[in-house]
Amino acid sequence: MLEVTGLTIRAGGTALVEDLSLDLATERLTCLIGPSGCGKSSVIKWLSGVLALELQAQGDARLDETTLSLPHPAIAYQPQQDTLFPWLTILENAALGLEIRGAPRNVARDKVRPLFSTFGLQGHEDSFPDQLSGGMRQRAAFLRTMVQDARVLLLDEPFSALDAVTRLKMQDWLTARLADDPRAVLLVTHDLFEATQIADRILVMGRNPGRIVADIPVTTPRIDRTEASLADTRSMLKSLLLEDTE
Ligand SMILES: Nc1ncnc2c1ncn2[C@@H]1O[C@H](COP(=O)(O)OP(=O)(O)OP(=O)(O)O)[C@@H](O)[C@H]1O
């Protein structure tokens, strides 16, 4: 289990996030939802070790009770955009995370290549990012993230740039991948429909300063999640989110 305790992030004298604590269970998909500017990205950037240098942060991160120094190889981060390099092929892009972690280039590419079919990218090893659809680029970014074998995945609004149909397909696809290959996942989203559809648990952030204001388990099995079965959870989330924007 990953635990964050007492996280405060400041910009000069202003607390952007204050005394935030959260935990992420292994094999669970946790969604982090909250109004724009409440600090969702800042929390996961801090956990990934990529928080802007001008921000000051203090807090503890522990994995199975061992304190982590950040960044840590057990934690992989996928930023908001797919951030594929346009001048690299999909194979080269997908292997890049492993290379950055020290794998020799040919070893990294040999590890990634057999996964192209699982990620719906077969035949596109030598394509460039601008030759792929948005959903395929997102799958390539997931491949680059998941192949790093990190126990914890931090995904910052991975579906926000996709059209509605591709987004639904990708949500199903991601939950299926995670069922095959479970990790502790923290997925940031603005979308309460997305959160209730895919999460095992939803953490709601409030703002000024950013903090966790609700912790909501979603216990209905994904296969049984219908508009009716999720209505109460969605209405509770809607109230919490609207309350914070008044
Ligand atoms: N480098 C920075 N310097 C000063 N303030 C910053 C910096 N980065 C972020 N902030 C501020 O911190 C607050 C939280 O930003 P953050 O991007 O973490 O929020 P968010 O909840 O992820 O927002 P969104 O949902 O719009 O992506 C915002 O008020 C933002 O303006």
Image (spheres, rainbow, N blue to C red):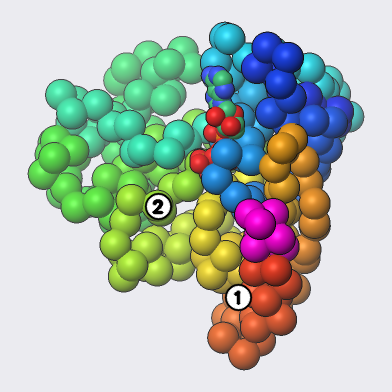
In this rendering, the answer to whether 168 lies above or below 105 is below
Where residue 160 is drawn, which disc sits there?
A: 2
Q: Residue furthest bottom?
A: 228
Q: Nearer the viewer, residue 101 or 217?
A: 217
Residue indicated by mark 1? 222
1 or 2: tag closer to the N-terminus: 2
Q: Is residue 174 magenta?
A: no
Range shown magenta: 240-246
In this rendering, the answer to whether 188 lies above or below 12 is below
Image coords of residue 104 (percent x, y): 37, 14
Image-quarter location of ligand 1? top right
| Label 1 with label 2: CB-CB less than 8 Å | no
Residue 95 relative to residue 131: left or right: right
Image coords of residue 127 (percent x, y): 12, 39
Image coords of residue 196 (percent x, y): 61, 69
What is the C-alpha distance between the residues marked 1 and 2?
21 Å
Residue at horizontal 37%, vertical 63%? Answer: 167
Residue 117 relative to residue 159: left or right: left
Residue at horizontal 43%, vertical 24%? Answer: 98
